[in-house]
Image (cartoon, grey):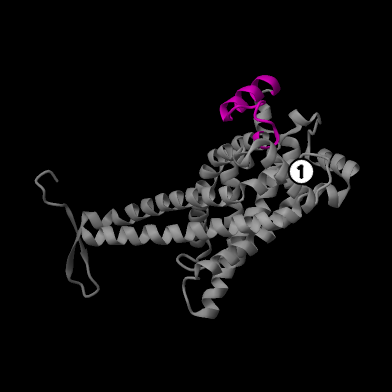
Amino acid sequence: MENGIKESQVGLSKNGAHTVRPATMVSEKGHKNDNEILNSLMSGALAGAVAKTSVAPLDRTKIIFQVSSNRFSAKEAYRLIYRTYLNEGFLSLWRGNSATMVRVIPYAAIQFCAHEQYKKLLGGYYGFQGAALTPIPRLLAGSLAGTTATMFTYPLDLVRARMAVTPKEMYSNIIHVFMRMSKEEGLKSLYRGFNPTILGVIPYAGISFFTYETLKKLHSEHSGRTQPYPLERLLFGACAGLLGQSASYPLDVVRRRMQTAGITGHTYSSILGTMREVVAEEGVIRGLYKGLSMNWVKGPVAVGISFTTFDLTQILLKKLQRVSAIQR
């Protein structure tokens, strides 16, 4: 009201006496939910940026092997990294990371935020509101979160893959990639490899979130502590990344082949067709699982950092908001 007096609502207490509830209390729930969404978006964005930057050189090396017919080995991966460093400089190991940041910041923000919202939604639907979800809804929440984030950010993932496997003379920046691909290969090319990506992200995100949430739940039940230590979070995240990426890795190879088909001279047009061609040329293990051993190093580190950064940032933001509320 304009006279400075806050409007109130009248209700009944348990003993039947009238109580007065300020209107501000009615909107507290909505305000709290808005804060939770904003916190999830900010924490997710930071988590994705820190994790991907930490493993960018390994990620770039993995992509180069995935899209070529060269045989992968740890020795060859090291040689590639060393040659890149000698020929193009130290920072060239992070080539394409700017495109990765443009993709991963909104991707991680949407994925983590969506996961929190899907947990609430499924918790209400299955009657677990405020409690830990059972295994199936827990797995479903992760898969839905990954699918939602991928649908919104896919073209940025394709651009990042192109920049990672091409010399800097071919594409000068992210916008140049979009413009050149649209002109030379058509707008459809921006979604080349989308189907294997979605098929891969369903088990990857589902298993990753499921494993991490399950390990935290088991830890809480056995240790009596509601919050794991940071190193324990890193370990839980590493296990989640290892299982999630191993389950979906062949589809990751397929999507990279399809994403970079325009510059490698191949005409990969379908998931099964790409798989058949890769297997025919390189075999099952050397083709569809090329670079997996590097992913077993890179993946757990990245996922562990990502989950840990998200959780710790969430805790910090909630503490800051409580302090701010007390000071008011």
Look at the picture and state if 146 lies above or below 132. above
Which image quarter: residue 239? bottom right
Dominant secondary structure (helix, strand or loop) of the stretch shown in magenta? helix
38 is within the stretch colored magenta: no
Look at the picture and state if 7 lies above or below 243. above
Look at the picture and state if 55 lies above or below 216. above
Q: Nearer the viewer, residue 308 or 326?
A: 308
Q: Residue at x 79, y 48 (%)?
A: 76
Answer whether residue 58 is visible to the viewer in this image: yes
Which image quarter: residue 198? top right
166 is within the stretch colored magenta: yes
In the rendered structure, the answer to whether residue 252 lies left or right of residue 115 reads right
Residue type (three-letter) at the residue carrying disc 1: Phe
Q: Residue at x 58, y 30 (%)?
A: 174
- Tell me the element at label 1: helix
Q: Residue furthest left?
A: 3
Residue 146 horizontal/vertical position (percent): 59, 49
Which quadrant is home to the C terminus? bottom left
Answer whether residue 120 is visible to the viewer in this image: no
Q: Residue furthest top?
A: 183
Q: Residue at x 51, y 46 (%)?
A: 110
User: Is disc 1 surrounded by few (<14), some (14 to 19) or many (20+) residues within 10 Å?
Assistant: many
Q: Residue at x 66, y 54 (%)?
A: 298
| Start-end of magenta stretch | 163-185
Marker count (numbered) = 1
In the rendered structure, the answer to whether residue 256 lies left or right of residue 304 reads right
Q: Nearer the viewer, residue 81 or 34?
A: 81
Residue under pointer 1 = 65
Residue 207 horizontal/vertical position (percent): 65, 59
